[in-house]
Image: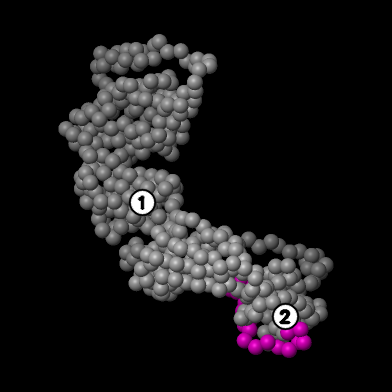
Amino acid sequence: MFKSIGTAVFFVLISLYITGCANIIPPGGGPRDSLPPTLVVALPKDSATNVRTKNFLLSFNEFVTLQGLQENLIVSPTVKNNPIIDYKLKNVTIKFKDSLEENTTYTLDFGKALVDVNESNVARGFRFIFSTGNSIDNGSYDGHVKIAATGKVDSTLIVVLHNNVNDTSIYKNTPRYYTRVDGKGNFSFKNLAPGTYAAYVIPTNFSRKYDDSTNYFGFLNALVAVSEKTKPDTIYAFEEFKKVEKKIYANTSSKDSKEDKRLKYNVTFNNGEQDLLGPLEMTFAKKITIKDTAAIKLVDTNFVSKEGYTINLDSAATKLSIGYNWPAGEPFKLLLPKGSITDSLGNTTAKSDTLSFYTKKEVDYGLIKFKFPTIDTTRHPVLQIIERDQIINSYPLTSNQLVIKRYKPGSYELRILFDTNKNGVWDTGSFKFNKRQPEIVIEIPKPISVRNNWENEITLTW
């Protein structure tokens, strides 16, 4: 605290000197101000050592305001109570409520909170530093955070450092330091005290603790030895368990069910044509029961039954799939005898239904020749083809080439899964039970475009 009247008077005089001749009304005309506010005077000065006060004054070259301070400000090391920060004209005042630790370097990172009044120019990444000891700590630690399952980045995450390296710290303790992940997945710590830390990735939350295993989380198996030139790390975040979405079912009145007892469903035909690459799918409005699977038949135009097709019902019992090695450009019929399918309201086919359709032609698809010049097949790579954020196909890669003879035209994203356990799908990690890292997926930055009736050659490197 400032204990003497003389110090308080000096504080006021400095403030008046900096702001006394200013005009609050911005001048008219002239070029637009595009420069962010610049620090002119700080009491104590920026990067001061042996600081004993808990009150600070920052004065800038223009009028400033603070926007979104609560979500932007990072005080390091973490304090129990954030300081009281206020602004007026060109000045920002800081008052720490907590006692300051001895021989400790403190930084206040304002993020995007510090803005000039006239043009809203942001002083991005403005940091104020001081030390209660004889020197400023200069340890640093940088790296990158990726979402393990997709290879993408998530700028809502933070990286935390614990000087208590016990595994339970992430659940119980406030971290010593934390920083944000930016839009490119990068993180950066500066002015760290040298030492050994455990590093984690968690979502931004008030407690800065890992308290929900359905949220993103990441960890390193090795501790971080912080120095002036700490080696960078990549940390992969994962959801150990998926959130279970509660399904809300609409109530159907008895009146409605009496009015319409027809079995309602949709079929995945495109202009009456069946895709060669997937099953024929029937989606029902309600949960269904198949009374006689053998009665449902796939036949040709002469009603001769086909062999080798499969009939499957999904776990929700609302999607019926007819799988078959479809030939190109041929007519088919699907026979649904009366009463063979019933939904949960007792609706059924009033009479036998016959679905007539053609399969698509070869010219409706494109051929893809993938080349992977730098692929390491010892890591068991799997090519994932993505459409609308969904994996629609996966292909294990056993060489540096892959040929797909038929593929639906369109634009697709690509990823490479390094399938450690060779089961063909991405597997999550676990920290609490066995410190198992998740399997890693690399995102191919540029999407591909597949043209129909065309030999599409695509070379991929990363």
Residue nearest the viewer, comparing 394 with 320: 394
**Where on the picture, by quarter, is residue 325?**
bottom right
Rendered location of residue 51, percent (x, y): 22, 28
Secondary structure of residue under mark 2: strand
**Where on the picture, by quarter, is residue 91?**
top left
Q: Looking at the figure, which quarter contains the C terminus?
A: bottom left
Q: Main secondary structure of the magenta part?
A: loop
Residue nearest the viewer, comparing 298 with 412: 412
The CA span between labels 2 and 1 is: 53 Å
Vertical arrangement, residue 454 with respect to residue 27, above or below:
below
- Residue in the image at 23% along x and 28% along y: 48
Q: Tell me the kind of residue under disc 2.
A: Phe
**Where on the picture, by quarter, is residue 420?**
bottom left
Rendered location of residue 446, percent (x, y): 49, 56
Q: Tell me the kind of residue under disc 1.
A: His
Residue nearest the viewer, comparing 93 with 89: 89
Residue nearest the viewer, comparing 214 with 14: 14
- Residue in the image at 68% along x and 69% along y: 268
Does residue 413 appear to the left or right of 294 in the view shown? left
Does residue 177 appear to the left or right of 401 in the view shown? left
- 110 inside magenta stretch: no
Q: Which mark is residue 332?
A: 2
- Residue in the image at 41% along x and 61% along y: 461
Rendered location of residue 67, percent (x, y): 46, 31
